[in-house]
């Protein structure tokens, strides 16, 4: 189709791993019998279609193949098998140092990178002022880049990548380097690129940025594409993968599950069902908006049996007036002895961005062992300073077993929380400022 910017078809990437250098030599010379290497499959039959003007995020744990697929798309690596088609001029900001000669100074590297992308010396010279202004590294641009700090390096690299007017921009974790002001400038450029209809492929562990900027998210795990879909849904599945509580479907290597099937598989992988969590016991008051498709998982050594919100008068509700106090309640039953359970809540916006939250470990509120059969009633009380609108509440019980982080029970997006406000300020929450203005002569 004419609107496809990147097409990846059944791409495999296999690396040969040798126990010692001599094994590589033996195999190259045909000495000995059999193989002298092990095969590591960095990518396993990955398919990916990115359309022009999309901003697509790629997420996954370390070693899932995110950087590998970006390097194959940009031509830095060749696939072992499969096909990649790119329609448009790519500018890539991959790992720190890629595409730069460490002995050249900043100006020379700008010309080097621009030439590699396909610009003439005259075109690069015309863009030089914009690149130097964006990088803002002063006289260091005339020094060899091997003398740069990591922050200076990424400023120059991103300035080159963003100002040569690519049709496709590929960024791999590079924005985690640099000060907060530079990061803000980079994200502002992201927004400009999206408005201009540019194609962006974005790899990051910053799930808030993935949720905010991406139209679609691809989830990789151990070289396999688990799924793709809306940012919120893929991020929720990713969080299960992170704690080892996502059951990989048997059909994973043969076909891609769609969003609905992923939700169903995720539900099937939970240690229990929503009814077991207590929702048949009147845990949610009438009129409160409970999510019928909440995402739930955990070992169930502890179970959240009841949950609700009360306003400052103690009335159960899901609508809170901005500026008023409110309390998040949950009752948790223990199926086994737990050394030090951690109770937590998180509030997200409708796009899935985590806005705020806390837990009993952060608050140093409860660090005691609990025996099987006991129950804990947990109450988080605070003032509502979020802007008016709809939010989603998630709850959890976790802990550490022999220094290993363990999820006992998590309920994602279990309740809708509506904030009623007659005054909204800028951003996610109100700083409740006191304003004083005086006229002076």
Image (cartoon, rainbow, N blue to C red):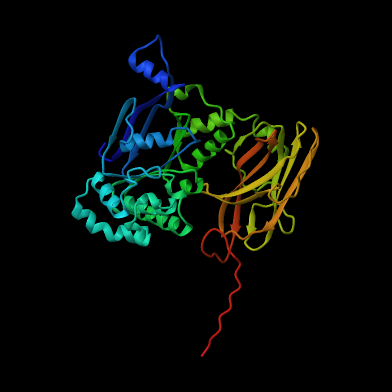
Q: Give x and y (percent) for residue 305.
A: 72, 38
Instruction: Identify the image quadrant of the N terminus.
Output: top left
Q: How many numbered dots are placed on residues in this image?
A: 0
Instruction: Give the residue at x 53% y 26%.
Output: 248
Residue found at the far bottom of this picture: 441
Image height check: is 154 above or below 374?
below
Q: Give x and y (percent) for residue 325.
A: 69, 59
Whether residue 264 sits left or right of residue 90 in the image: it is: right
Residue found at the far top of this picture: 33
Whether residue 322 sits left or right of residue 263 in the image: it is: right
Q: Give x and y (percent) for residue 260.
A: 49, 33
Image height check: is 403 above or below 147?
above
Res 319 quadrant in image: bottom right
Instruction: Give the residue at x 33% y 15%.
Output: 29
Q: Nearer the viewer, residue 300 or 326?
A: 300
Q: Give x and y (percent) for residue 231.
A: 47, 42
Regarding residue 416, the answer to whether it shows in the image is: yes
Q: Nearer the viewer, residue 308 or 335?
A: 335
Whether residue 371 sits left or right of residue 94 in the image: it is: right
Regarding residue 165, the answer to whether it shows in the image is: no
Image height check: is 259 above or below 361?
above
Q: Nearer the viewer, residue 321 or 370?
A: 370
Q: Nearer the viewer, residue 169 or 427?
A: 169
């Amino acid at each position: 189709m004419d609107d496809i910017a990147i097409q990846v078809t059944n791409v495999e990437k296999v690396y040969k791993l040798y126990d010692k250098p001599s094994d590589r030599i033996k195999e190259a010379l045909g000495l000995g019998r059999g193989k002298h290497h092990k095969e590591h499959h960095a990518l396993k039959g990955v398919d990916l279609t990115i359309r022009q003007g999309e901003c697509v995020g790629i997420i996954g744990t370390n070693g899932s193949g995110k950087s590998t697929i970006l390097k194959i798309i940009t031509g830095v690596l060749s696939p072992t098998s499969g096909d990649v088609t790119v329609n448009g001029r790519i500018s890539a900001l991959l790992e720190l140092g890629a595409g730069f000669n460490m002995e050249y100074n900043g100006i020379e590297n700008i010309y080097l990178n621009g030439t590699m992308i396909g610009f003439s010396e005259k075109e690069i010279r015309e863009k030089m002022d914009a690149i130097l202004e964006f990088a803002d590294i002063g006289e260091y641009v005339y020094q060899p880049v091997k003398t740069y700090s990591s922050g200076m390096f990424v400023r120059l690299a991103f300035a080159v990548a963003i100002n040569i007017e690519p049709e496709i921009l590929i960024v791999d974790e590079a924005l985690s380097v640099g000060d907060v002001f530079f990061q803000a400038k980079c994200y502002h450029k992201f927004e400009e690129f999206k408005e201009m209809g540019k194609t962006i492929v974005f790899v990051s562990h910053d799930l808030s940025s993935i949720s905010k900027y991406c139209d679609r998210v691809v989830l990789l795990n151990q070289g396999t594409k688990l799924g793709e879909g809306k940012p919120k849904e893929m991020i929720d599945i990713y969080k299960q993968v992170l704690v080892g509580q996502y059951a990989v479907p048997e059909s994973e290597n043969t076909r891609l599950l769609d969003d609905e099937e992923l939700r169903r598989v995720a539900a099937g992988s939970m240690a229990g069902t929503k009814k077991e969590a207590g929702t048949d016991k009147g845990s949610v008051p009438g009129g409160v908006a409970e999510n019928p498709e909440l995402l739930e998982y955990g070992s169930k050594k502890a179970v959240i049996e009841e949950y609700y919100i009360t306003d400052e008068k103690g009335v159960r509700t899901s609508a809170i007036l901005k500026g008023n106090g409110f309390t998040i309640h949950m009752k948790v039953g223990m199926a086994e002895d737990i050394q030090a359970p951690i109770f937590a809540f998180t509030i997200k916006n409708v796009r899935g961005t985590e806005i705020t939250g806390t837990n009993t470990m952060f608050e140093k509120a409860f660090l005691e062992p609990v025996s099987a059969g006991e129950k804990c009633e947990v109450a988080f009380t605070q003032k509502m300073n979020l802007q008016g609108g709809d939010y989603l509440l998630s709850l959890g019980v976790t802990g550490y077993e022999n220094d290993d982080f363990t999820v006992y029970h998590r309920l994602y997006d279990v309740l809708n929380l509506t904030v009623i406000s007659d005054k909204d300020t800028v951003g996610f929450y109100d700083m409740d400022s006191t304003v004083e203005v005086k006229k002076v002569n």
